[in-house]
Image: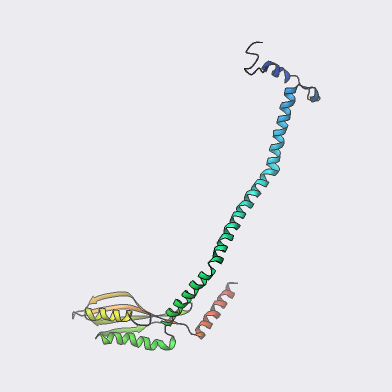
Amino acid sequence: MSTSAKGRAGIDFNRLVQDFKGLDPNDPGLWPVAPRVAVFIALLVATIAAFWWFDWRDQIDTLERVQAEEMQLRDSWVAKKRQAVNLEEHRLQLAEIDRQFGALLKQLPNRAEMDSLLSDINQAGLGRGLQFELFKPGADVVKEFYAEMPIEIRVLGVYHDLGEFVSDVARMPRIVTLNNIGLDADKDGKLKLEARATTYRYLDEEELAQQRQAAQAAQGARR
């Protein structure tokens, strides 16, 4: 047998070609072994591909989704376990936050004490020998549980006294902030300080009730 008719592994390619010629599709039982094996392999591959396309692929997608959900649940469980372990520490931190918040809240006057606070700010300037050209409290700006009162201020004095006045305001037991500060000299050589002082007060029970009613009314209007 020539090397052209037979492969290196001893396979007779001419014989294989002849086996695939003249096959009777109505009687595959009489086919040679090579065509029957080839058809069996082709059917097997087609069956596996059909299962993959119509069934296994969806199952694999479902499995991957379930595995992802399992990882999320596991991470959530670990996070909740850590929170449970540190629950007492969180409670202590919350208690400390409440204490600090209460201390800050005590620095806010109520509505009845605002006149006294405004008088203290005015006296702080007069005590430094300053001359007020403007001291005009504005309308309250109501927030969630407190209100802001802006005060437009314009005072005349020397640089040192103006600086001491700003320091006095900053050291007040009540919270007062100075913003939009401007400093100019007038024709007599005195300095003119213009600023917006903002002081804060907490809302009383009546105002808080009004806040809640307004919030409920707004929520009902959105519905």
**Percent position of residue 140, x then y:** 43, 81
* Residue 87 higher or lower than 30, as above or below: below
**Percent position of residue 71, x then y:** 59, 54
Instruction: Give the residue displayed 36% in from the left and 86% down from the top.
Output: 118
**Percent position of residue 48, x then y:** 70, 37
Instruction: Give the residue displayed 54% in from the left and 79% down from the top.
Output: 212
* Residue 119 higher or lower than 62, as above or below: below
Instruction: Give the residue displayed 46% in from the left and 78% down from the top.
Output: 99
* Residue 193 higher or lower than 73, as above or below: below
Side of 35 relative to 141 (left or right): right
Q: Residue furthest left?
A: 188
Q: Quadrant of the N terminus?
A: top right
Residue 153: image quadrant is bottom left
In this picture the colour scheme is rainbow
Side of 25 relative to 178 (left or right): right
Side of 62 relative to 163 (left or right): right
Of residue 135 and residue 21, the one placed in the foreground of this image is 21
